[in-house]
Amino acid sequence: MKTKITAFMISLLVISGCSSNSSQSVEEVDHSNMNEEMDHSTMNQDEMENEHMSHDEVVSLNDSTGENELKIPSVLEHDDEKGSVYTVRAQKGKTEIFDGTETVTYGYNGSFLGPMIRLEKGDTVKIKTVNELDEETTFHWHGLEVAGSADGGPHESLKPGEEKVIEFKVEQEASTLWFHPHPEGKTAEQVYNGLAGLIYIEDDNSKSLGLPNEYGKNDIPLIFQDRTFDDKKQLNFSAAMNDDGTIGDTLLINGTLNPKLAVNKEKVRLRLLNGSNARNYTFKLNTGDSFVQIATDGGFLNKPVTLKEITLTPSERAEIVIDFSQLDTENELALINEDGSILLPFEVSDQNGKVSEIPGEMNNFSITEEEKSLPVTKKLELFGMMDQVTINGKKFDPERIDFTQQQGETEVWEIYNKPDEMGGMIHPFHIHGAQFKILSRNGEEPPENERGWKDSISIHPDETVKIAIQFKHKGVYMFHCHILEHEDNGMMGQVKVE
Ligand SMILES: [Cu+2]
């Protein structure tokens, strides 16, 4: 690439401290065991500063050299004729990520990552999940509105050799979801080793909008994951592991090292998934040109939103469209990160592609006056760092139900990211089993490109967000920080929907 933007370092100060809580009239976890779990007064200043030392800077990603064609996940074939029964196997294998070297990896129905599962709204789907690993795992369907028993949280653990069939009806709208393991305390390592796959939901709307929809050609999934490889080119999680989120200098997109994407001269839809354990990305084009966002985590935006950059924290998705129709082979366009590192160079062919227009109206998402006027009925406070992370002063306890909510009833949750005097860090907050609406960020309307269905939301230090959430099904669902090491360290709670 000729164009190279000067890198600047992003500093992320990670801070700890103590919290105090006033009593609230809303449902809130009691803080009686806060002191034994959260009291940092025993940690002296030197210890605190030492812990911060390694987190002041986030290592930059190496530029993609563009020497490898981007891999596109295969589409999962169904087992039956009708096309609604699938099998997903968690497996261990070896993958040639680096030429001539085999890296030990995990994958679904293969050695690394997983296939894409394409579902249709209205389908009744059966998925047989099989654990072929030599450790326990679960199959969690991130963003899918299913009963708690099918959601694959830590309670649905499968031992090695065990299998489980789940059945559900797809009732939510077209969106890009994903699946990954969720075993208690082991999620970060299993995702890091390669367990992640995509789910596309299609519906009448998505098929009638005329958006680019040729999978792998002008409708491209992009799973962004940063990794650290040891000197034998292995993924050594325990060596790379960081309690505040494992970060690597090597970017893999769909498991491809140094990827490039060949495109025709046409509009191309990119389905971005931040599948990293902890890294945030701010995606831009190297030319500074704008692109268009068409979808959030859980569905289309009402109108396309023109952006020059978009930030995705772990587990967030966005669909964007880049217009290559006026470009030619001379153009050196690339997707870059905020600090200028090259994530994905594009290679524009001299072939004209499909002519497509992005419709001005794509969806009918709305927040009703009633939803805006609902009182806050659940308050959550995210706090801490490293292995001291908590929600409402507590760490995850599989035996404890933190909240209850009625099936089909909309409630407003208020979530606060409490910093201490030294700052704080972004926590990407995710709730299982539902898509929610962002009502406000610090009392203000959310930005245009967040006015759509979400299941994960970035919450900045000292920020308060309000969301309206309704669960369509019953069961016990997790809510947690999607920095996977924070989740494993107990930054997670449970809501029981009855
Ligand atoms: Cu966190």
Image: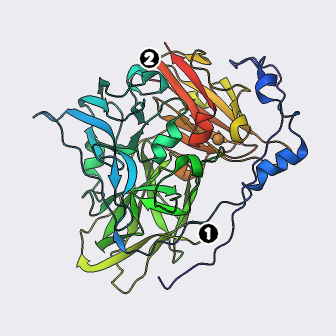
Residue that sits furthest to the front in the current view? 232
Q: Which mark is residue 164?
A: none
Label 1, secondary structure: give it: loop
Query: What amino acid is at disc 2?
Result: Lys
Q: Residue at x 63, y 28 (%)?
A: 413
Q: Which mark is residue 339?
A: 1
Camera-nearest residue between 89 and 225: 89
Residue 440, percent across and down? 64, 40
Label 2, secondary structure: give it: loop
Q: Image check: 357 left or right of 138? A: left
Q: Which color scheme does this rendered protein use?
A: rainbow
> How many badges with numbers are in the image?
2
What is the quadrant of residue 253 in the picture?
bottom left
- Estimate the spatial distance between the alpha carbons at disc 1 and disc 2, rounded to whole Å: 43 Å
Q: Please indicate, yes or no, whether residue 54 appears anywhere in the rendered image.
A: yes
Residue 376, percent across and down? 67, 25
For mark 2, what is the residue? 474
Q: Please indicate, yes or no, whether residue 278 appears anywhere in the rendered image.
A: no
Q: Residue at x 33, y 83 (%)?
A: 328
Q: Residue at x 38, y 25 (%)?
A: 158
Q: Quadrant of ligand 1?
A: top right
Camera-nearest residue between 399 and 301: 399
Q: Earlier in the sequence, mark 1 or mark 2?
A: 1
Q: Is residue 185 above or below residue 69?
A: above
What is the quadrant of residue 54 in the picture?
bottom right
Q: Residue at x 60, y 48 (%)?
A: 241
> Mark 1 or 2, which is nearer the eye?
1
What is the quadrant of residue 429 in the picture?
top right
